[in-house]
Structures are given as structure tokens and as C-alpha cells.
Image (cartoon, rainbow, N blue to C red):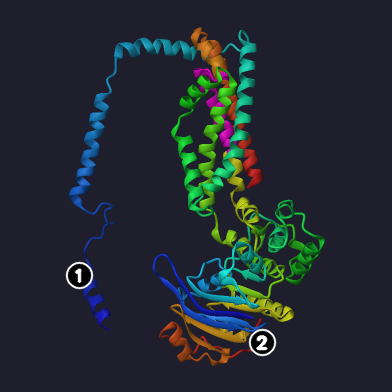
């Protein structure tokens, strides 16, 4: 009974007063300091970027030439180079994705805290972190130094980058899986591999397929960039075109890259719908 | 057949889920485990097949001490304990048949299971069980196409194909409507009788438990508060298990004309 009386008093006190959602940061001094601090930093940060307007006006003209070239792309003058570059890029993208997936799956399993013991988890997370920390360009420069110019360096770079991407996202998908479904398979007396095959794999398969196609798409686009540091592919052709100021050829190459990415995008949509 | 001695489970958070629980179940007995949420019912049945590792105490099935087994021995003994889950726990992207056959995983090697090349005797038994639970025509449907009651029937078939001695049943009817609940409970109890299986059934619905089982055990805060026949469950007993409430409407005399 006493709680009821207390509630009544509390209610009397509350009635007629306004109600507001409680603030995320309760201390008002801290709240305002953070807010004003962030604003001051932003103003100062923008202020520190100086713009050379004469340089921009010159650059705009150059940029415009580049844009105009898009209206008139030249696919034929360097047709053979473009075709060879594209084929090389596709080979690099496909092979590095396949090899990357094959390595990512065991590492992804090891990097999921809910199925791997702690030492395995730490090692696999370490590999993932290393792969993610090193940007493709940096790895590519190193690989070109080791293996020389050409697609082999690009292939190894992209395989390495795929591990960081795919293993991390696969591990997160496994950590988010429905625990009871996996538990039910374990309760039948299955071995560890059977448990993965029946309890875990069906749950993460659609996501794995989707991510793999997405990675193929990324690897193709990356192959265009890696050419700039000598790691083969369409990027090498693109680099040469820029070096010769052949903007019409460069435009043709960029259009081919855009087209290929769009086709991959469409295909990934179709395939993902199938495996859902 | 199943002996539980001084079984204690303390979670890493410090919560004591079970405190020195002693329980003995003879062959073929169907037992209902009742108690409020958080009483340790789920923990108790998961400690039996060691999906949850008990902190201390022993569990003995057919004379074999489960708590001291290594991983290989544990897998062998798990085959003899079929488990049925609250939310059915079917692997949703696998077919009904794959879900049922997964009950044989403890008996077949990895490559056989990976390639789905099960022995013909297993396949025949899966078809027989699906027929018994009335779902033979659904064999090649994906599990997520089924209704709740149908999924639970597949779950029952998966547990039975293990050829178990004991069924561990965790809230089999909690996600089902009242009529389907009765049908599922009846199916479980009939199958236990046909095959001479013992079963531990965690259940919230006291009236439903009274209708079907031979023995009721009441758990409260990890301690057994009641152990007796269903008709010994009086309002006083329910008050000691669950706390003060009006229990007259909950305790039903077993009526024969249920759906």
C-alpha cells in the first residue's frame, strides 16, 4: 500500500509539468563545451584550406577540355591497347577474387568470436587488420618492387586486399547469425565441420555470395587504379593515355570501366536474388 | 536411466542458475519442468547435453558420466539425446529433408553429410518419420516456407531420427496457438510412449503440462521446489513456485474432450 501512496504523491508532483526527452549527455557544461568546441574546430579547419583562385580558373579550362573529350571518346586509335588492358584487368579481377575468397573463408571462420577459440581468433583478426591497414596502392608499389611491372603484382595485391574485406565481413555475419539454429545442429552430435556445414554455412551463404560479387566489382575498379603504379591492367593503358594528353582515349577507357562496373552491378543483383 | 547429481551452474556474470539439483528419471518417463522465467529450466536441460557446461555436479545417462567426457565421447552421447527447441531452431535455408537428416550427423562421416549422400536406411527412416508427423509431402520444401506447427513437427522428426533414449524439450509450444500447442504436446507424448523414450519438457503452460505428463518438477531460482504427480499441483504449490496469484483458474481438471 505504501508504494501506492508514494506513487500518488509522485504523480501530483509530475502533473502539469512539461516533459522532454532526456539529453544524451547529461552534464550541461560538458554538452555545450563539446558542441561549441566542434563548431570552432570546423570553422578553423575550413579556414586553413587556402584556395588559389587564379590556378583554379586555369584548371577549369583544362578540366573542361577533358569533359568535352567525353562527348567524343575515341575507342579506335588505341583500340588494341584498350582491349588488351581490359582483358588483363578482367583476368586480374577474377583470379584475385577467387583466390581471395578461398583464403578468406578459413580466416573469416577463425575471426568469428562465437565459433573460434581465442588464440585462433586473435591471429585471424590480426591478418584481417594488417590487410585492411595497408592500402592497395601501398601494397601494389611494394609488389611491383618485388615482382616487377605487370599484372602479377596487381593480382597479388588484390588477393591480399580481398582477404581483409571478405574475411572481416564474413566473420561479422557469422557473429550475427541465429545462435539457436547452430545450437540445434550441435545438439545432434555433429562434428565441428558438420556443424559449420549445416548450422553456419546456410545462414551466411547469401551474404557471402553477395559480398564476393561486390568484391569482384571492387577488384575490377581497383585494377584501373593499380595500373597507375605499374601493376598492369586497364589502369596502365589509362595512365599512358593521360601521359600523352590523349583525353579522347582516356574518356573511352573510363566509359568502358563504367560500363563494365554497371554490368557487374546488374549481374550481382540478379545472382543475389537467386541465392536469397 | 538419467541421473543428475548436485548439478550446479554459475554463469561468468556470477548468476547462480542452478544450485545442487538432484533428479532421477527412469526409462520411458515423461516429465514436465515448470517454473518462472529465469528459474534455470533452459540451463538445466542444456547442462544435460552440455550445450551449456555445468560448473559442478554430474549427469549420468545409461551409466555413463556425461560431465567428464571429451569432445568425441560427448558427440557420441549427444546422439542419444534428441533436442526440441522453443523457436523450432530449424536451419531455415535448408530443406525439410536436410533438416530431418541433420539428426543423423552424429552417425555419418563428414563427406557423406557434405555431399548429402546419406545411407538409404537413414533416408527411409526420414521419410517414415515425416509421414508419421504428417509432412511427407513437404520433404523438399525449404524450412522457412512452413508454418510454426509444421516447423515444430520437423523439429520433432529431427530429434527422433537420432534414435535417442531421451528427449530434451525446451518450451515446445511457447510460439504456437493453443490448439497447435495441444497437438504438438500430444504428438511428443505419443511418440515417447511408442518408442519408450524418457523426456524432460520445459513448459510454461501448467494446465497443458498437467494434461499430458506423468510427473511434474517445479524449479524456482535454480532449486527444485516440487516433485510429484500432476494432480498434486495445488494453488499452494504454485504459490511456492511462482509467487502469490489466484491459481484456481490455471489448474484444470484433465478433461477428455480437448481438441
Residue B154 place in picture, x, y as percent: 68, 66
Which image quarter: residue B94?
bottom right
* Magenta span includes A224: yes
At horizontal 49% and vertical 9% (from top left) the residue drawn is A243
Which image quarter: residue A78?
top right
Magenta stretch prevailing secondary structure: helix
Check the residue under mark 1 and report the chain it is in.
A
Q: Is residue B81 visible?
A: yes
Which image quarter: residue A103?
top right
Q: Secondary structure at mark 2?
A: loop
For label 2, the residue is: B257
On screen, A47 above or below B66? above
From the image, which quarter does the N terminus of chain B lie in?
Answer: bottom right
- The segment highlighted magenta reads A212-234
On screen, B211 above or below B143? below
Left or right position of A64 against B104 = left
At horizontal 21% and vertical 53% (from top left) the residue drawn is A27
What is the CA distance from the residue labelled 2 to the residue labelled 1?
55 Å
On screen, A106 above or below A97? below
Left or right position of B173 against B100 = left
Q: Is residue A263 visible?
A: no
From the image, which quarter does the C terminus of chain B lie in?
Answer: bottom right
Left or right position of A140 against A34 = right
Residue B118 place in picture, x, y as percent: 77, 58
Residue A112 place in picture, x, y as percent: 51, 49
Q: Is the residue marked by circle 2 packed among few (<14), some (14-19), or many (20+) residues within 10 Å?
A: few
At horizontal 48% and vertical 15% (from top left) the residue drawn is A67
Residue in the foreground of this view, choosing between A136 and A121: A121
* Magenta span includes A158: no
Q: Residue A13 — which label?
A: 1
Outermost residue toward the left in this view:
A29
Marks 2 and 1 in Cβ contact (< 8 Å): no
Amino acid at each position: 500500500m505504501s508504494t501506492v501512496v508514494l506513487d500518488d504523491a509522485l504523480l501530483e508532483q509530475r502533473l502539469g509539468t512539461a516533459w522532454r526527452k532526456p539529453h544524451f549527455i547529461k552534464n550541461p557544461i560538458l554538452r555545450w563545451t563539446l558542441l561549441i568546441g566542434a563548431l570552432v574546430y570546423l570553422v578553423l579547419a575550413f579556414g586553413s584550406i587556402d584556395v588559389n583562385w587564379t590556378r583554379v580558373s586555369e584548371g577549369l579550362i583544362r578540366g573542361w577540355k577533358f569533359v568535352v573529350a567525353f562527348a567524343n571518346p575515341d575507342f579506335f586509335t588505341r583500340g588494341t591497347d584498350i582491349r588488351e588492358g581490359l582483358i588483363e584487368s578482367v583476368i586480374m579481377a577474377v583470379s584475385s577474387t577467387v583466390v581471395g575468397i578461398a583464403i578468406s573463408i578459413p580466416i573469416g571462420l577463425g575471426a568469428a568470436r562465437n565459433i573460434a577459440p581465442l588464440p585462433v581468433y586473435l591471429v585471424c583478426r590480426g591478418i584481417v587488420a594488417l590487410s585492411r591497414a595497408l592500402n592497395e596502392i601501398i601494397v601494389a608499389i611494394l609488389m611491383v618492387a618485388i615482382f616487377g611491372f605487370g599484372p602479377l603484382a596487381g593480382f597479388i595485391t588484390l588477393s591480399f586486399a580481398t582477404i581483409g574485406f571478405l574475411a572481416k565481413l564474413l566473420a561479422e555475419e557469422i557473429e550475427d547469425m541465429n545462435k539457436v539454429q547452430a545450437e540445434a545442429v550441435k545438439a545432434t552430435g555433429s562434428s565441428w565441420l558438420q556443424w559449420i556445414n549445416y548450422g553456419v554455412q546456410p545462414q551466411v551463404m547469401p551474404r557471402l555470395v553477395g559480398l564476393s560479387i561486390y568484391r569482384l566489382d571492387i577488384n575490377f575498379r581497383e585494377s584501373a587504379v593499380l595500373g597507375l603504379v605499374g601493376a598492369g591492367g586497364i589502369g596502365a593503358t589509362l595512365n599512358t593515355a593521360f601521359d600523352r594528353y590523349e583525353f579522347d582515349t582516356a574518356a573511352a577507357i573510363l566509359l568502358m570501366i563504367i560500363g563494365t562496373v554497371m554490368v557487374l552491378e546488374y549481374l550481382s543483383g540478379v545472382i543475389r536474388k537467386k541465392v536469397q | 536411466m538419467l541421473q543428475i547429481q548436485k548439478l550446479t551452474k554459475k554463469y561468468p556474470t556470477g548468476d547462480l542458475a542452478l544450485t545442487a539439483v538432484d533428479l532421477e528419471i527412469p526409462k520411458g518417463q515423461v516429465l514436465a519442468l515448470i517454473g518462472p522465467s529465469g528459474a534455470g529450466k533452459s540451463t538445466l536441460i542444456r547442462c544435460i547435453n552440455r550445450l551449456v557446461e555445468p560448473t559442478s555436479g554430474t549427469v549420468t545417462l545409461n551409466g555413463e558420466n556425461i560431465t567428464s567426457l571429451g569432445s568425441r565421447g560427448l558427440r557420441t552421447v549427444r546422439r542419444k539425446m534428441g533436442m526440441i527447441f522453443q523457436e523450432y531452431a530449424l536451419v531455415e535455408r535448408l530443406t525439410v529433408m536436410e533438416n530431418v537428416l541433420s539428426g543423423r550427423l552424429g552417425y555419418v562421416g563428414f563427406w557423406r553429410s557434405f555431399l548429402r549422400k546419406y545411407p538409404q536406411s537413414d533416408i527411409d527412416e526420414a521419410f517414415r518419420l515425416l509421414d508419421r508427423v504428417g509432412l511427407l509431402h513437404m520433404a523438399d520444401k525449404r524450412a522457412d516456407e512452413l508454418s510454426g506447427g509444421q516447423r515444430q513437427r520437423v523439429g520433432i522428426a529431427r530429434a527422433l531420427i537420432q534414435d535417442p533414449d531421451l528427449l530434451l524439450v525446451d518450451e515446445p509450444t511457447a510460439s504456437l496457438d493453443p490448439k497447435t500447442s495441444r497437438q504438438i504436446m500430444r504428438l511428443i507424448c505419443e511418440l515417447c510412449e511408442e518408442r519408450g523414450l524418457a523426456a524432460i519438457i520445459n513448459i510454461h503452460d501448467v494446465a497443458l503440462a498437467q494434461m499430458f505428463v506423468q510427473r511434474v518438477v517445479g524449479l524456482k531460482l535454480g532449486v527444485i521446489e516440487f516433485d510429484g504427480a500432476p494432480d498434486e499441483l495445488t494453488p499452494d504449490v504454485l504459490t511456492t513456485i511462482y509467487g502469490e496469484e489466484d491459481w484456481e483458474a490455471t489448474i484444470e481438471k484433465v478433461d477428455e474432450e480437448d481438441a
